Image (cartoon, rainbow, N blue to C red):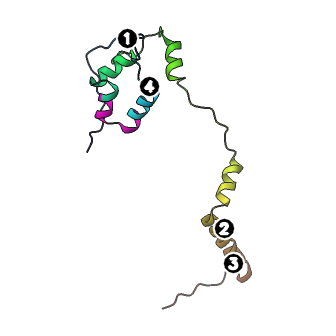
Amino acid sequence: ATARLTVVSMAKMARVQPDTGDPSWPTRLELTTLMEEQTIEELQKVGRDNGVNGLCARLGTDPQKGLPDPVPDWSARVAHFGENQFEERKLTPYLGFLWVQLKEKIILLLLFMATLEIVIKGIFGEGMERQEAI
């Protein structure tokens, strides 16, 4: 019965520059856990019992305005947190998706049944009526 995290903007301003003398920035693991768990308890832990304002203070950002432009410690942030971009992956070609689907048993069954219906209609013709059992 943990409460879900609700992001609320705070009127109280946080420092813009993080404390570089001590390890004030949260680790990637702490931030990832916060995003996965999304609980008030995890926010309090990462924000050092000060919630959103504590997290903003640790990140060196303003809760209302975000990071300043330009960010004075950009290279340090990139070194600590990594680049803010998706990993490039090779695109799967269309025939690759088709090949994966053709390996599925249900797809093979549907193809077999459709082929069987076409063959039966070709042999017996369109005029054959279906009779219902009573």
Circle 2 — which element?
Answer: helix
- Give the residue pinned by disc 3: 121
Q: Position of residue 128 (x, y in %)?
A: 65, 84
- Which residue occupies 30% across, 20% down? 53
| Kind of residue at badge 3 | Lys
Answer yes or no: do the residues labelled 1 and 4 have beta carbons within 8 Å?
A: no
* Percent coordinates x, y for residue 86 in the rendering: 56, 30
Write down the residue under mark 4. Answer: 27
Q: Amino acid at mark 2?
A: Leu
Helix, strand or loop for disc 1 = loop
Residue annotated with mark 2: 111
Q: Is residue 122 left or right of residue 56?
A: right
Under tag 4, what secondary structure?
A: loop
The residue lying toward the viewer, choosing from 100 and 130, is 100
Q: Is residue 8 left or right of residue 18?
A: left
- Marks 3/1 in contact by CB < 8 Å: the verdict is no
Distance, label 3 to label 4, CA atoms, is 66 Å
**C-alpha separation, residue under disc 1 versus residue under disc 4:** 18 Å
Residue at image point 64% right, 57% down = 101
Q: Earlier in the sequence, mark 3 or mark 1?
A: 1
Please provide the residue range marked out in magenta: 35-44
**Do the numbered discs 3 and 2 sit on residues whose CB atoms are within 8 Å?**
no
Q: Pointer 1: what residue?
A: 16
